[in-house]
Each structure stands twice: as structure tokens, then as C-alpha cells.
Amino acid sequence: MATLGVVMITREEALRRLDAVAHELVALRAALAEGWAETPVENPAQAFLAKCGGWEDTRSPEEIIAEIYTARTVSHRAESLGPEETA
């Protein structure tokens, strides 16, 4: 069984961290209020492209699909999640 270590910090360090979080919350609140769009989106795909832009690729769809399949790898993650063997 793993044990969790407890790290003690000083009162001053706790206050400094809380102050940093408070400043970050103020900045996030301002950014959200400034950039929030209340207008409904009629076409989600167009809204996505307007925000993220598109890309250009000279390859055909078949070439892109072939590259995706070539880049795939076999994962052995499920095997490593099983019970550990005892010696």
C-alpha cells in the first residue's frame, strides 16, 4: 500500500499561494467577461474554423488515411494494469 507524504508549508507560504490564486481568478474573470459571446452559433463547424482556422495539406485523403494507419502502434497498457506477479 502506498503512503502519501504530507508537506508542511509556512503560514506565509500559504498566504502567498492564496494571493497568487486570487490574482489568477481576477485575470480569468476579466478575460471571460471580455471574451464571452452571447450570440448562438448556427453552424458549429464554421464557428470552430473561425476560432481555430483551417489547414492546408497537399496529400489526398487516401494518403492521409494511409499515414494514420502506418503511425498506429500496439499498446500493451492493458497487460500492465493486471495484478502483479509474485516471485
Image (cartoon, helix red, strand yellow):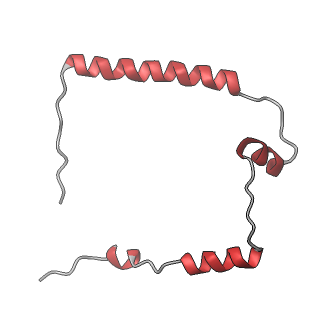
Where residue 17 sits in the image (x, y, percent)? 32, 23
Give the position of the C terminus as an image quadrant.
Answer: bottom left
Q: Residue visible at 30% across and 18% down?
A: 16
Task: Classify residue 68 by image quadrant.
Answer: bottom right
Residue at the limit of the structure toward the left, as seen here: 87
Closest to the observer, 71 or 19 = 71
Q: Quadrant of the N terminus?
A: bottom left
Residue at the far right in the pictured view:
42
The answer to whether 10 is drawn above or below residue 82 in the figure is above
User: Going 23% across and 16% down the picture, which residue do you hit?
Assistant: 12
- The answer to whether residue 46 is left or right of residue 31 is right
Of 77 and 81, nearer the camera is 77
What residue lies at 79% left-to-right and 29% top-to-bottom? 38
Vertical placement of 6 versus 26: above or below?
Answer: below
Quadrant in the picture for residue 71: bottom right
Q: How many marks?
A: 0
Residue 55: x %, y % from top left: 73, 55
Residue at x 86%, y 48% (from the top left corner): 43
Residue 25 horizontal/vertical position (percent) = 50, 23
Splitting the image into 4 quarters, where does residue 66 fall?
bottom right
Residue placed furthest toward the front: 58
Q: Please indicate whether residue 47 sits to the left or right of residue 70 in the image.
A: right
